[in-house]
Image (cartoon, rainbow, N blue to C red):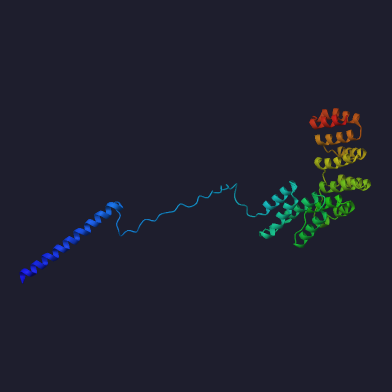
Amino acid sequence: MQQQHQKFRRAVSAVACARANSISANARRSRRFDGPGVRRSDPPPRLHRPRRCRPRRPRLRALGPRPASLHPLYVASIRAFARAGRLQAAVDAFERMDLFACPPQATAYNAIMDALVHAHHHHHQAHKVYVRMLATGLAPDLHTHTIRLRSFCLTARPHVALRLLRTLPDRGCHARPVAYCTVVSGLYAHGHPHDARRLFDEMLQGPVFLDTATFNKVLHDLCKKGDISEAAALLAKVLKRGMSVNRFTYNIWIRGLCECGRLAQAVALVKEMDDYITPDVVTYNTLIRGL
C-alpha cells in the first residue's frame, strides 16, 4: 500500500510540475509579443482618434480694463455711425441699449437727437426722442436744448427757438455763445435781421463771452448768404469789444468779398492780413478763384 501511495504522489507532483512549466512558457511567449512590461491581465491601450482640425479664431487682445458701464461705448458708436452717414445703424444701436440692460442716459439721447437733426429730414423723429427722454424722467441739459434750437432754426421756426432761449434760465441752464449764435444765424437766415441784431447786441453786453470759433460760424452764414454789410457790422462790433480774430475769420471774410465781386477790398484785406497773420494756401486759392 505504501508503494502505491508513493507512486500516486509522484504522478500528481509530475502533473503539477508539467502544468507549472506550461504556464511559465505561455507567460514568456506573451511578453515576447506584447512587449516588455505588458501583461495579459492589463487592459488594451485606447486608440485616440484624431479630431478634425478646426481653424482657431484669433484672440483679441484686451486694449484696457473692461469699462464699468457699456454706456460710453454705445454713445461713441452712435456718434461714429452718424458721422459716417449710417443713420439707421445709429438708431439701431440706440434701440439695443434697453435690450442689453443698458438704459440710455442724457448723453445717449443727445447723440441720437443730434444725428437726427443733422440729417435735415428727421426733425419730427428728434422731437419724439425728446418726448421719450422726458417720459423716462431724465432732465434735459444745455446740449439737449442747443440741439432743439438748431432743429427749430432749420425748420423755419427761429422765433420758437428764441422763446426757448429766453426760458433756458428757468430750466436751470445758462445759455452759452453757441446757443445764442445758433438763434442769431436762424433769424438772419429766415429774414429777421432786426431781431438777430438785437439778440447779438444782448449777447455782447451780457456775461456771455463770445469766442472766435463760434463767431466764425455766424460770419460764414452771413457771407454765404451774401449779406456782406451785415457781416461787416458784426465784425466791427466784436473787434470793438476786443475779440481777436484768426486765419479762419480772414479766409471767410475774403471769400465773402470775392463772391460779391469786391476784389479790391479782398486784395487789400490780404495785405492787411499779412501784417498780423500769415496767409495760407486757402487764402490765396480763394483770392485766385475770385479773380
Can you give x and y, in whole percent of width and height, for residue 71 in the image?
Answer: 68, 54
Asked where in the image residue 134 lies, by quadrant, the reply is: bottom right
Q: Where in the figure is residue 125, as x and y percent of width and height?
A: 80, 56
Left or right side of 5 for 288: right
Question: In this view of the protein, which residue sits in the foreground, 65 or 259?
Answer: 259
The x, y position of residue 117, in whole percent, is 80, 51
Q: Residue at x 93, y 38 (%)?
A: 229
In the rendered image, which quarter is residue 104 located in?
A: bottom right
Q: Is residue 20 visible?
A: yes
Looking at the rendered image, the quarter that the C terminus falls into is top right
**Residue drawn at (80%, 41%), measured in percent from left and top?**
213
Q: Please indicate, yes or no, whether residue 246 appears anywhere in the rendered image.
A: no
Q: Position of residue 33 (x, y in %)?
A: 29, 52
Quadrant into which the N terminus falls: bottom left
Tag count:
0
Residue nearest the observer in this picture, 41 or 103? 41
